[in-house]
């Protein structure tokens, strides 16, 4: 499979300008609220996969309702809202989107950790698109329950757009309380009291394992690609297997 090298400056100038404006607004709002914290370094670091996601998402012309899982500072959520989508932002650690940004862009925010939710606060058969960017590798426990929740919240014609590092080329993960380099079937399900880690990668996937995980969870992969930006990543666009 060919690997597309992502050079942010190669993307359309209007897209670059739009994200620059969004990031400046987020930084200004975030620093005003949290004073000493400044997310500008992370926003600059992550702009390559924001661009490629935007490129993919804007092709879904009929989409109206989107769920942004792991929204963090809200960059993609704001972009999608500015492009006419009804956005639900979800994050499971800390609500990092300042209130003025949420209000201005009408972002419905859900604070939830999908790994530990027995009854997740997500409507069934509702979203046209679910975005899960650079999140899969951070899950602490068996990823299947989370992907089944996502499958359940997609409408019949909906799509999941998901990207994650390619373990074949990405730096090896460090050992942690639940980090392991095993098949995802062997990773335990969440139970109360199990240890968690907040940010390091818990599990990285090779291409065939990434594909198998999605199909095991009832998805049909419509598009699969690799891109190089801060390491090599895999990106899949998948629909429900009934389509």
Image (spheres, helix red, strand yellow):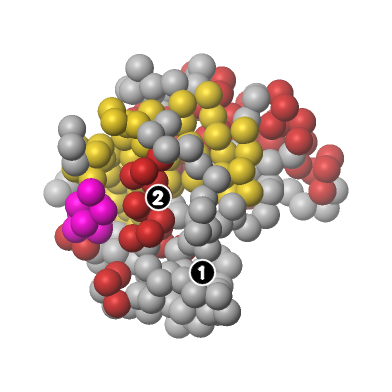
Which residue matches tag 1? 200
Q: Residue 149 carries which label?
A: 2
Is residue 118 visible from the viewing direction of this image?
Answer: yes
- Residue 208 location (% of width, % of height): 17, 60
- Residue 62 location (% of width, % of height): 35, 17
Secondary structure under tag 2 reads helix
Q: Is residue 166 left or right of residue 27?
A: left
Residue 197 in which image quadrant: bottom right
**Residue beneath the point at 21% across and 57% down:** 216
- Residue 24 location (% of width, % of height): 68, 32
Separation (CA) of disc 1 from disc 2: 23 Å
Q: Is residue 177 above or below residue 156?
A: below
Which quadrant holds the C terminus? top left
Q: In this view, does 127 lie above or below 189?
A: above
Secondary structure under tag 1 reads loop
Question: Could you say which is closer to the camera, residue 116 or residue 228?
Answer: 116
**Residue beneath the point at 32% across and 22% down:** 59
Q: Nearer the viewer, mark 1 or mark 2?
A: 2
- Residue 135 location (% of width, % of height): 45, 54
Residue 29 in which image quadrant: top right
Provide the major secondary structure of the magenta segment: helix
Residue 181 in which image quadrant: bottom left
Q: What stretch is highlighted in magenta?
A: 210-218
Please say if the residues under marks 1 and 2 sit with CB atoms less than 8 Å apart: no
**Residue beneath the point at 74% across and 39% down:** 98
Q: In this view, does 103 lie to the left or right of 214?
A: right
Q: In this view, does 66 lie to the left or right of 211?
A: right
**Residue beneath the point at 57% across and 39% down:** 89
Q: Does the magenta stretch include residue 211?
A: yes
């Amino acid at each position: 499979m060919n690997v597309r090298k992502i050079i942010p400056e190669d993307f359309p100038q209007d897209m670059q300008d739009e994200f620059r404006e969004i990031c400046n607004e987020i930084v200004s709002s975030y620093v005003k609220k949290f004073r000493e914290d400044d997310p500008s370094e992370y926003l600059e670091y992550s702009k390559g996969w924001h661009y490629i996601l935007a490129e993919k998402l804007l092709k879904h012309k009929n989409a109206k309702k989107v769920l942004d899982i792991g929204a963090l500072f809200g960059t993609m959520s704001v972009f999608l809202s500015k492009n006419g989508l009804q956005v639900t932002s979800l994050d499971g650690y800390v609500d990092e989107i300042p209130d003025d940004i949420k209000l201005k862009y009408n972002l419905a925010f859900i604070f939830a950790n999908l790994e530990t939710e027995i009854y997740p606060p997500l409507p069934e058969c509702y979203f046209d698109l679910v975005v899960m960017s650079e999140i899969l590798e951070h899950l602490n426990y068996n990823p299947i329950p989370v992907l089944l929740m996502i499958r359940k919240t997609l409408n019949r014609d909906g799509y999941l757009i998901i990207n994650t590092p390619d373990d074949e080329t990405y730096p090896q993960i460090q050992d942690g309380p639940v980090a392991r380099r095993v098949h995802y079937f062997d990773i335990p399900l969440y139970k109360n009291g199990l240890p968690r880690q907040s940010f390091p990668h818990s599990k990285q996937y090779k291409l065939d394992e990434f594909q198998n995980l999605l199909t095991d969870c009832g998805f049909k992969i419509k598009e699969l690609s690799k891109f190089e930006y801060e390491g090599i990543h895999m990106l899949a666009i998948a629909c429900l297997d009934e389509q």
